Image (cartoon, helix red, strand yellow):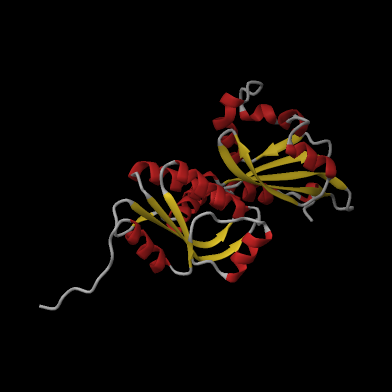
Amino acid sequence: MMKVNEFSIDTFKLMETMSDNIFIADKNMKLIWINEEARNLVTELLPYLPAIAHPDDLIGMSLHEIHGQKSNFFKVMKKKNFPHKSKVPIFGYTADLFVNELFDQNGDMNGYILVWRDVTKEEQQRIKSEKMIEEMSTPILPVVLNNALFAPLIGTFDERRFDHLRERVLTECVKSGADYLIFDFSGVTVVENELLVDEFEKLRATVQLLGAHTFFCGFSSELVKLFTKNKVKVEERTFSQYQQAIHHVLYLEGLEITPRKKT
């Protein structure tokens, strides 16, 4: 446990060299010290802090006065469930917050240490990576016919991924003017929310309003049970394999695949 009255000059010098923003408050939650990195952060945030003209103006202010009694931070401090870690947004920034109590040499609580680590770039990169993964895991592909699209569904589906799928499907259907859309469920491992199976049928009905016929293929026995359990009836024909669905679309277009004659 860190002890306030055991802080040496070397300890403060060490905290000054750290890239994290460090705030020290007394047991009444009044700030008594901040490191240079925290001063730089507060300087950047001054436009959002009308009551503060300089980072040193924070010294002596209550943490409650800074954060407000309706903030999540206030709830954390009130519950005193330490150490506490969380990710919080701050005026356009994203920070990892660490809060813990400080104790004196007798073991009595004598203050608090707050460490803010700016993870804005990391969070932006994480969101960008997740978006790229979603794009890659929910492709809407053209097939042999210009008026047909293929949607191979892969992995686990939750509400977020389904919302992304719905947006991409409707966008591509409108953009391409597709007459046919084939969903292949053979790569689906888990549907986290059983109610989503009904959403797939609703999506089919929406696509039909756009003028396209939708076909499902590749159902596993688990998915069949989910559709049956939730009393979801698929109105269009279903197929066990993607190739069968393609052949059916070709049939509807008056086409067929035949072997090329040997010359």
Which of the two residues, 65 or 128, is positioned nearer the viewer here? Answer: 128
Q: Position of residue 102 (x, y in %)?
A: 80, 48
Quarter of the image where the C terminus is located = bottom left
Which of the two residues, 261 or 28, is positioned nearer the viewer here? Answer: 261
- Tell whether 81 sits left or right of 114: right
The image quadrant that residue 211 belongs to is: top left
- Can the viewer see residue 164? no
Q: Residue at x 53, y 44 (%)?
A: 120
Q: Residue at x 60, y 65 (%)?
A: 224
- Can the viewer see residue 78? yes
- Tell whether 233 sits left or right of 143: right
Tally of numbered tags: 0
Q: Residue at x 66, y 21 (%)?
A: 51
- Tell whether 131 sits left or right of 251: right
Which of the two residues, 93 or 237, is positioned nearer the viewer here? Answer: 237
- Tell whether 138 sits left or right of 26: left
Quarter of the image where the N terminus is located = bottom right
Q: Position of residue 213 (x, y in %)?
A: 43, 51
Residue that lies at the very extreme toward the bottom in this rendered image: 262
Which of the two residues, 117 or 92, is positioned nearer the viewer here? Answer: 92
Residue that lies at the very extreme toward the left in this rendered image: 263
Q: Residue at x 74, y 39 (%)?
A: 73
Q: Position of residue 42 (x, y in %)?
A: 60, 33
Q: Position of residue 91 (x, y in %)?
A: 59, 33
